[in-house]
Amino acid sequence: MPIQSLTNITADSRVVIDANIFVYAANRTSSECANFLERCAREEVRGVTTFEALAEVTHRLMLEDALAMGIISEGILAAYGDRASPFQTSSSTGALLRRSST
């Protein structure tokens, strides 16, 4: 199945929701993700996710809060390497973003 914009997903579709959708909506870095989750909440689209995706969302938002509060630093995250810290800070929003492997 080809990748498509979240706005193009038709009503009554069943969709597996990845952690990034939740994170980008929570960080307000993607109105498309926020609108998509609103469509799921209205049951226009049938979104499902996994426990693992929710655990990743929780962990990423916790790290973001810890960085914002000064509890941890980007240097500490970087010291653990890409496997433990797949994030970078967006200079425009301060939000954490997943590093691209490309």
Image (cartoon, grey):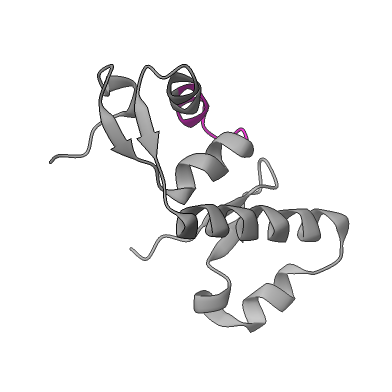
* Residue at the (58%, 71%) spot, across then down: 85
Number of marks present in the image shown: 0
Residue segment shown in magenta: 28-35
Judge by depth and name the residue closer to the eye, 9 or 49. 49
| 33 in relation to 89, above or below | above
The reply to whether the magenta stretch includes residue 34 is: yes
| 34 in relation to 80, above or below | above
Judge by depth and name the residue closer to the eye, 24 or 58. 58
- Name which quarter of the figure residue 56 lies in: bottom right
The reply to whether the magenta stretch includes residue 95 is: no
Magenta segment's dominant SS is helix
> In the shown orientation, is residue 64 left or right of residue 60?
right
* Name of the residue lying farthest toward the left: 1
- Name which quarter of the figure residue 12 lies in: top left
* Residue at the (52%, 27%) spot, across then down: 34
Judge by depth and name the residue closer to the eye, 86 or 42. 42
User: In x, y percent, where is residue 23?
Assistant: 56, 44
> In the shown orientation, is residue 29 left or right of residue 35?
right
Query: Which quarter shows the C terminus?
Result: bottom left
> In the shown orientation, is residue 72 left or right of residue 74?
right
| 13 in relation to 91, above or below | above
Judge by depth and name the residue closer to the eye, 36 or 102. 36
User: In x, y percent, where is residue 22?
Assistant: 52, 41
User: In x, y percent, where is residue 16?
Assistant: 33, 42
* Name of the residue lying farthest toward the right: 70
User: In x, y percent, where is residue 89?
Assistant: 64, 55
* Residue at the (67%, 52%) spot, across then down: 61
Query: Which quarter shows the N terminus?
Result: top left
* Residue at the (47%, 47%) spot, across then down: 20
